[in-house]
Image (spheres, rainbow, N blue to C red):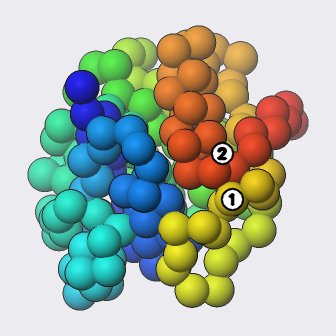
Amino acid sequence: MAVNVTIIGADVLGQSIGLALKGSEAPMTVTLHDRDHERAQQGVSIGAGDRAVWNLPAAVKDADLVFVNETLNHIEKTLEVLGRELREGAVVTDTASIKQPVLRWATEYLPEGIHFVGSTPLGAPRTPTADAFREKRYAILPLPASAEAAVKLVTDTITLMGAAPLFIEPE
């Protein structure tokens, strides 16, 4: 069964996540969303996603896993929207390097049944590439209340991208 992944933020990092996932052997459907729809469409044209969706609720409607890859000043509002739009059982992760506000917002806006597992790559690519994470560390910062299945989905996905998961305490 294919995992439905949505990447919110189709910049170089978001496109690299998509390329790494689409280059894996796992069945994945990748939806790209970006405030600049042309950037999301560019990601699809290079193979980083299967489709670009401009409307955020539509982009996450069927998502099993959502990567929030936005600047810190946009993440709070995005998590608020996700809390209303995601289906129960969906998992949200992020790529922010500053974690405390993101973890606080996730706890505030994501209701029970939608799982949050913080994460961030340790190093960012300069150009979109499927090998951006190969043999590089990728931090995983689960909350104490993070469901084991959610942590496993994020860890397995990061491993599929070629990265080496590194568990770090959120504090």
Q: Where is residue 15, by image quadrant?
A: bottom left
Relative to the observer, which residue lies in front, 104 or 92?
92
Q: Residues within 10 Å of mark 2 (few under 14, many from 20)?
A: many
Q: Where is residue 167, by image quadrant?
A: top right
Residue with the mark numbered 2: 119
Q: Position of residue 53 (x, y in %)?
A: 16, 65
Q: Residue at x 66, y 45 (%)?
A: 119
Up the image or down, 81 lies above or below 115; here it is below
Q: Position of residue 160 (x, y in %)?
A: 54, 43
Looking at the image, can residue 14 be seen? no
Relative to the observer, which residue lies in front, 41 or 94?
41
**Residue type (three-letter) at the residue carrying disc 2:** Ser
Quarter occupied by the N terminus: top left
Up the image or down, 50 lies above or below 104; here it is below
Label whose residue precedes the other's in the sequence (1 or 2):
2
Q: Secondary structure at mark 2?
A: strand
**Residue type (three-letter) at the residue carrying disc 1:** Arg
Q: Secondary structure at mark 1?
A: loop
The disc label shown at residue 134, or none? 1
Relative to the observer, which residue lies in front, 45 or 90?
45
Q: Give the side of residue 65 with respect to residue 63, left or right.
A: right
Q: Residue at x 25, y 33 (%)?
A: 2
Whole-angstrom CA distance, mark 1 to mark 2, is: 16 Å
Q: Position of residue 133 (x, y in %)?
A: 66, 61
Q: How many marks are shown on the rendered structure?
A: 2
Q: Give the side of residue 129 with respect to residue 22, left or right.
A: right
Q: Residue at x 28, y 20 (%)?
A: 88
Up the image or down, 106 lies above or below 153; here it is below
Quarter occupied by the C terminus: top right
Relative to the observer, which residue lies in front, 159 or 81?
159
Looking at the image, can residue 13 be seen? yes
Q: Residue at x 63, y 69 (%)?
A: 132
